[in-house]
Amino acid sequence: MSLRNTAQRWGAVSQLLHWGIVALIAWMAWLGLTMVDMPPTPAKINTYALHKSVGLTLLVLVVVRLAWRLYAGAPRAVPGTPTWQARIASLTHVALYVLLLGIPLSGWLFNSAAGYPLQWFKQFNLPALAGKDEGLAELAISIHEWGFWALLALVALHASAALYHHLFQGDDTLRRMLPGYRPQP
């Protein structure tokens, strides 16, 4: 399998970034939804710190993925895909990238405006994006939370479309993102 994307399939780098980001999003969703109900203990503080560190890691991986996609291109739509479906897929990908960048940035902005320090896995501190500002903190956390739910909806739509193509259309839309798949000549 090629490291770079081809006209027919996603390459190994794109697949690794795609599935790695999917796994991290699932972990972040679980962390984010469970940490708010934890009792105020050191474990809660550590869970919040982990959530922030993984979020920053996701931000970097999404930037790398976007840069890789710009460099390596993307496969063409599977032959026979209607133009309207290809356009919806493109718009969905753009919206996914916007949310995958916006959610961690809004978390970072909330953290800054709330006056909390931000560290990456206790290795180094990151600069604040803004000074302490209660109104900005409320706006940022609202964007962060609503962005998460919008991301969840888009991921469900994205996965449903891939499964629809796989199960009902019988085409390679899903298979070409799976490791080890070899398209038929």
Image: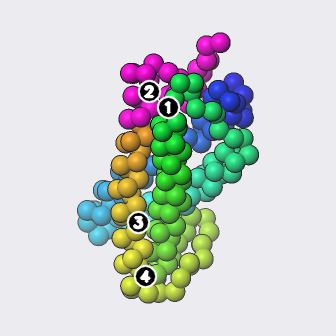
Seen from the viewer's position, the closer of residues 4 and 185 is 185
Name the residue at the top extreme: 185
- The answer to whether mark 2 and mark 3 are in CB contact below 8 A is no
The residue tagged with tag 1: helix, strand or loop? Answer: loop
Left or right placement of residue 98 versus residue 139 in this view: right
Seen from the viewer's position, the closer of residues 151 and 126 is 151
The residue tagged with tag 3: helix, strand or loop? Answer: helix
Q: How crowded is mark 3: few (under 14 residues within 10 Å), some or many (20 or more)?
A: many
Instruction: Give the CA distance from mark 1 to mark 2.
Output: 12 Å
Find residue 117 and report its horizontal and vertical position in percent: 51, 76
Left or right placement of residue 78 versus residue 50 in this view: right
For image coordinates 47% across by 87% down, the residue present is 132
| Residue assigned mark 4 | 136
| Residue assigned mark 2 | 165
The residue tagged with tag 4: helix, strand or loop? Answer: helix
- Part of the protein shown in magenta: 160-185
Assess whether residue 177 is covered by the magenta stretch. Answer: yes
| Residue assigned mark 1 | 82
Instruction: Give the CA distance from mark 2 to mark 4.
Output: 42 Å
**Mark whose residue sits in front, 2 or 4:** 2
| Residue assigned mark 3 | 144
Residue 92 visible to an observer of this rendering: yes
Q: In this view, does 11 lie above or below 114?
A: above
The amino acid type, in three-letter code, at marker 1 is Pro
The amino acid type, in three-letter code, at marker 2 is His
